[in-house]
Each structure stands twice: as structure tokens, then as C-alpha cells.
Image (cartoon, helix red, strand yellow):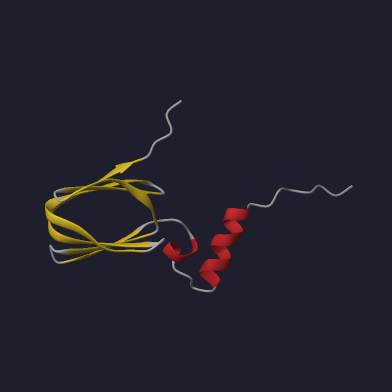
Amino acid sequence: MPIFRKKNKKGMNNRFNSLLEIPQEVSTTMPKITIIGFEKMLIENYKGILEYQDFYIRINTYVGILNINGLELNLQEMTSDDLIVTGKIENIDFEQITDEE
């Protein structure tokens, strides 16, 4: 009698994506952050905005929370997948989500 193994769907997707040379940020929910100088930032694959003020923005991503500090910060453009932050960006930090039980 043959033994059937449960296929690893994630591993299969990784091999398929690498075969077709699909970037990881396109095929997964991994965020991609592009910083242009000190005044513009593009965040792709975000979940939502947690807090927004002109000196502090907190953005929820699928792997953690992105904190942006600066002056005159604005959300210039928002779509369901992309977000553009403009202003004088001074500091960026990332809070990783951990599962604590």
C-alpha cells in the first residue's frame, strides 16, 4: 500500500516563484520599503495605518509595525497595497511581531 505524504505548499510556491523569477515581495505579503533621500518613502504590502500625526506615523505590516518619525509628515498617496509618506524623515524603526504564549 503506498504511503501518501502531505505536500509542503509553501515550499512548492517558493520553487515555482524562483523558477519564474518572481520577486518575493510580489508573491508574498512581505513588505517592501523604498526610501528616496530624507523626504520620501514608499511602503508596499502594508496592512493599515495605526497612528498618524504630522511628526509620527505607525504603519502595520504583515511582519511587524513600522514607526516613522520626522517633521511635516504627510500621507501623499494611498492605495490598498502602496503608501507614500513625504516630509522630513528623521528616524525609522521596525517592531517585529512575535507570538508569545
Please tell me whether residue 32 is drawn above or below residue 2 in the rendered image: below
* Residue placed most toward the observer, 16 or 88: 88
Task: Measuring from the top left, give residue 53's x and y in whole percent.
Answer: 19, 47
Task: Measuring from the top left, give residue 46's x and y in whole percent.
Answer: 38, 55
Please tell me whether residue 34 is drawn above or below residue 98 in the rendered image: below
Task: Measuring from the top left, give residue 73's x and y in whole percent.
Answer: 16, 56
- Along the horizontal axis of the image, is 88 left or right of 7? left
- Along the horizontal axis of the image, is 16 left or right of 90? right
- Along the horizontal axis of the image, is 68 left or right of 79? left
* Residue placed most toward the observer, 88 or 79: 79
- Along the horizontal axis of the image, is 26 left or right of 6? left
Furthest-top residue in this view: 101
Residue located at (55% from left, 72% from top):
19
Furthest-right residue in this view: 1
Please tell me whether residue 91 is drawn above or below residue 35 in the rendered image: above
Report the number of discs: 0
Residue located at (44% from left, 63% from top):
24
Q: Quadrant of residue 43?
A: bottom left
Residue located at (54% from left, 61% from top):
14
Residue located at (71% from left, 48% from top):
6
